Image: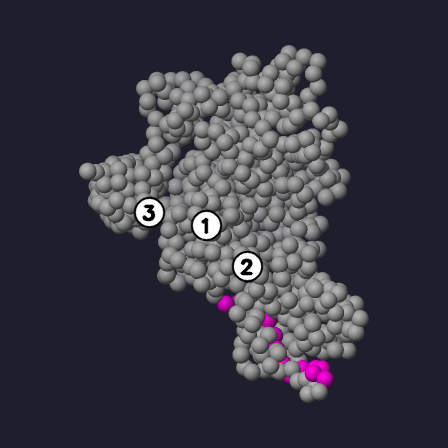
Amino acid sequence: MVRVMLVRFGFLLLMISFVFLSNNTLGQQQDDDDDSAVYIVTLKQPPTVHRFEEQELKHKNSKFTPKLKPRNNARKRHGKSKIPSVVQSHDSFLRKTLKGEKYIKLYSYHYLINGFALFINSQQAEKLSMRSEVANIVLDNSVRTATTYTPQFMGLPQGAWVKEGGFEIAGEGVIIGFIDTGIDPNHPSFNDNDSKRSYPIPKHFSGVCEVTPDFPSGSCNKKLIGARHFAQSAVTRGIFNSSEDYASPFDGDGHGTHTASVAAGNHGVPVIVSNHNFGYASGIAPRAFISVYKALYKSFGGFAADVVAAIDQAAQDGVDILSLSITPNRKPPGVATFFNPIDMALLSAVKAGIFVVQAAGNTCPAPKTMSSFSPWIFTVGASSHDRVYSNSLTLGNNVTIPGMGFAIPTDSGKMYKMISAFHALNNSTSVDKDMYVGECQDYENFDQDRVSGKLLICSYSARFVLGLSTIKQALDVAKNLSATGVIFYIDPYVLGFEINPTPMDMPGIIIPSVEDSKTLLKYYNSSIQRDVTTKEIVSFGAVATIEGDILKPNLVAPGNSIWGAWSSVSTDSTEFEGEKFAMMSGTSMAAPHVAGVAALIKQSYPQFAPSTIASALSTTALLNDNKGGPIMAQRTYSNPDQSLYTATPFDMGSGFVNATAALDPGLVFDTSFEDYISFLCGINGSDQVVFNYTGFRCPANNTTVSGFDLNLPSITVSTLSGMQIFRRSMRNIAGNETYNVGWSPPYGVSMKVSPTQFSIAMGETQVLSVTLTVTKNSSSSSFGRIGLFGNTGHIVNIPVTVITKIASS
């Protein structure tokens, strides 16, 4: 079974928090009245990517169809030779406006947005806002970070990779840019030595490899072709810790190394953790190129000013795909969540032909917890795959308890006595002196003679989740006490946390279920023998054996319990400290899976626009799990396996990514930059904001579109009153084919789709007309689906969602 984990899934993106930063967050010596902060200023003059098509955008009827290939020509026309003049014009403007005043310019933006980031006070910000050249000025905001087997689970070795010519060339020629915590360049997932084929760097790429003491010359190669870091906003605030965060592209956290390896890591890299081999890792597009733009850091997360600089540079360098496993900390104010520097920069990136994929966020399961909304960005939620590393504990009463942990088993067929940490204390230790002794963190608390040769039972409390106690420390204690192994039972107060399997270098098991933990303790306590008179324990009768590390089908996926490369210096997860691989969960792990599949699509169809790639991914998605059952969604954090329900489009979007089918989608839905502008212009009160950010004026003839009218491969209606007609235009990229159309309407709605059958030749388009009519008043969301079934095997799925339904009188 596949289940949707942790977050809601959709196709729209990114809220940003515009937070005023108090003085104590600024690492400056300031007066009490000083309210200096970082501001992002946008100018009205269009950026490079818009200027290139300025003439095309002004032609008849304001039609401004984006060109998909000239991004690199644009760089030749308006790119590096123009950068100094842009910077100089920014500097000149600031000198004239802030005559003689102190300020710090962090960045000049020019490729995707025209503007700069400044450290100034509120009076200076007010002064800038009064200038006619300034379109927009907002406070900087904070952002945060939001994976061996998943290529097999996704069918790549027998499917998508075969279509590409094998894993040896899967993703070849495509550049994926990662905005994350950097990369460990020494990891084998990123070397260029293991391939028999040469790595010719694409001619359209102009990025560089930053050289620092932490990231010396030679760190980049023909696989890792670009690396930079962006931290001026954090440095200006005085919160940058160079010893922990590294003023270089080097990854001090592990997150960026992990996501890059999931999308594009080398094929066949051994996953060895705690001296155990857990298989061989591969990125989804193992021949794709990697370019890294570090804008997130271990100690503080990141800031929008740095992220925008990273996005701007990545687009200028010529990346084909941009992967962001980040989410904002808070929802932005204003007319709509779409209008913020990051989303507007990404809109320009999409216009330049870059496919942008972003994590949906990790605050679910709950309604309205998406952290990502803009329709030009492909948003990814996390789901499960069918492999789980698990083990079990067989008790002396023949009861078997399931658990988890990467550990060797105890000797086959042999039972070992168990002893609770509370019963293994030495004479100088008591629970009164240390209430956490049950967590097995201090060797000096225990009597080695009592523990030697036994299985030590330790409690797993919320302190492990918080990092105050660690499994690694408990294992060290157990080894020093000559224990045979360790059993961790779950504290009943540890609810709402995802517990991943943990590497152990001795027999061990974590029992994640409260009920199973009670079963263990009940058996253990019933087997203790006490002196009748003194009530002292005279013997421990409970025995057990740990049967370790078997693989079985269960509920985990390309977002949950995902192996990936790990930074050599990362201390983010103590269980994987010093290891080359780590297991992580979250939409941060799901997004690079999709970035990798997008690279495979881009390799097969270099001319595809970002919206076309998004369409191919969406319409071919799987609706059922690998056993033929429905995809299930997680309702609550606590007891997730007991709180599952059939997933809806609000949980899984179009479904589970199908890499093989996405390479041959049949029909595709195209959405242009013009469509996105029309959508933004349709938001009440947005005219001036649209102009401020994009330089385009909303049309006076009201030729705007609503969200449900965008030519997306889905139909979502927030309020349906009476009857309404929706249209979708599809283009055939395959051979001549005849399609039959079927549908199932949302509850409380009747649906009619026309035509019900059509034939279409390669390159032709077909408009689908969908009529929805309310049959029952309701404020509850209901879901339907349209299916197009081609006679040569193509299947196109279109989810239909209606929230509020109002029947006509």
Residue located at (58% from left, 46% from top)? 260
Q: Within 10 Å of the Cα at label 2, are there few (<14), some (14-19), or many (20+) other Cα atoms? A: some
Closer to the camera in the image, 789 or 326: 326
The residue to which callout 1 is attached is 366
Residue located at (69% from left, 50% from top)? 570
763 lies above or below 685? below
Q: Position of residue 659 (x, y in %)?
A: 44, 50
Is 85 on the left or on the right of 719, as rendered? Answer: right
Q: Position of residue 373 (x, y in %)?
A: 45, 38
Q: Secondary structure at mark 2?
A: loop
The residue to which callout 3 is attached is 780
**Residue 495 - label:** 2
Whether residue 723 appears in magenta in the rendering, the answer is no
738 lies above or below 304? below
Of mark 1 and mark 2, the one earlier in the sequence is: 1
Is 666 on the left or on the right of 310, as rendered? Answer: left
Whether residue 537 appears in magenta in the rendering, the answer is yes
Closer to the camera in the image, 413 or 761: 413
Query: Looking at numbered disc 1 in the image, what kind of residue is underneath it?
Result: Ala
